[in-house]
Amino acid sequence: MSSTDSRATAVEKGDEYFTGILDSILRKLKTDPSTITTEDARRLSENVVAKDEQTAKIVSAVEAFAAASEVIHEVNPQLGQAPHTSLLTVVNDLKVAVEQNPADVTTEVLRTAQNVVSKMQRAVGHTNAPHPELEDELREEIAKIEPKVAEGTVTIEEANHLHSLEARAHGHTERGGITSLAQSVAAKRERQLSLSNGSSPINNRSRANSKTFSSAHQAENNPNVKLEQGTIQPFTAKKREESLSDQTNSLYGCSTDDLKQGKGQAQHDREVTTKLAEMSLDTESKMSFHKRENSQPSVEVK
């Protein structure tokens, strides 16, 4: 039986994964038999059905070369390092074996496999056991969340649910992934909603400025305003202090974004204060002029 026939036998068994392994073993047997390992022999004997004498001889030859190679490496290590089997290969072999013979899985086999999984998790730094059965649910949740993250409409509840689901599915959450991005966007959205629903510092300042303008206007048009030391009673100054106090109280507790937005309003407030002072001086000048005019004796024109 040729190598092609042996390969066909493996395919007939329904194991396409081991077809590649078989090709590799047959290649070693033809070109460099000393590189055949005991793992190669095990895979070949477990996954190739010896239907005829030729196939049986190939399997026996591979086993013989594998045993000889192992002895050579033990006696003379300088001839080469001992064969090293990839863990991924072993895991894939286990997966195929379980799929082909599920009835062979016992409680002891399961316990041993779980112990190995725990050791591998510690080796990569994942202490929480992942739950692969949640992968489908996680993918569905991510598909729903991604458009909302792009639109900025994801909620805190949705972001927290995604975080919990990813942590349970993978045993950890990916830093900088969709979960952390969703939480960041949701937190920003909550802050914006809180500011829009609460009292606006800018509106408070606008109301304070309006009140100051109204009071100053009343003081200007009222002829009974008290005079003290040649100026208007510090009514305007008092209102200015109240306005500044309102402004300070409004700004207390605001975020950095609010303070930046309020810079233009602060400049406007300073201009308003200057305008109020000019109005006070104009009012004082007008009242002094009228007072002097009324105190001068009238001149009779002949």
Image (tube, helix red, strand yellow):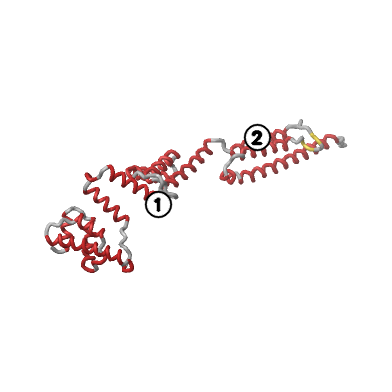
Mark yes or no: residue 24 visible.
no
Which residue corresponds to the image point at 42% horizontal and 46% vertical from the top-left? Answer: 179
Q: In this view, does 73 lie to the left or right of 210?
A: left
Q: Which quadrant holds residue 253?
A: top right
Which residue corresponds to the image point at 29% horizontal and 54% vertical from the top-left? Answer: 90
Mark yes or no: residue 33 visible.
yes
Q: Looking at the picture, which amino acid does disc 1 mark?
A: Val
Q: In this view, does 158 lie to the left or right of 206?
A: left
Q: Which of 223 and 109 is in front in this view?
A: 109
Q: Nearer the viewer, residue 84 or 130?
A: 84
Q: Is residue 163 left or right of residue 239?
A: left
Which quadrant is home to the N terminus?
Answer: bottom left
Which quadrant is home to the C terminus?
Answer: top right
Instruction: Give the CA distance from mark 1 to mark 2.
Output: 66 Å
Q: Nearer the viewer, residue 281 or 252?
A: 252
The mark closer to the camera, 1 or 2, is 1
Read off the residue under disc 2. 211
Residue neighbourhood size for the residue with mark 1, other residues' Cα within 10 Å, grouped as few (<14), some (14–19), many (≥20): few
Q: Residue 124 carries which label?
A: 1
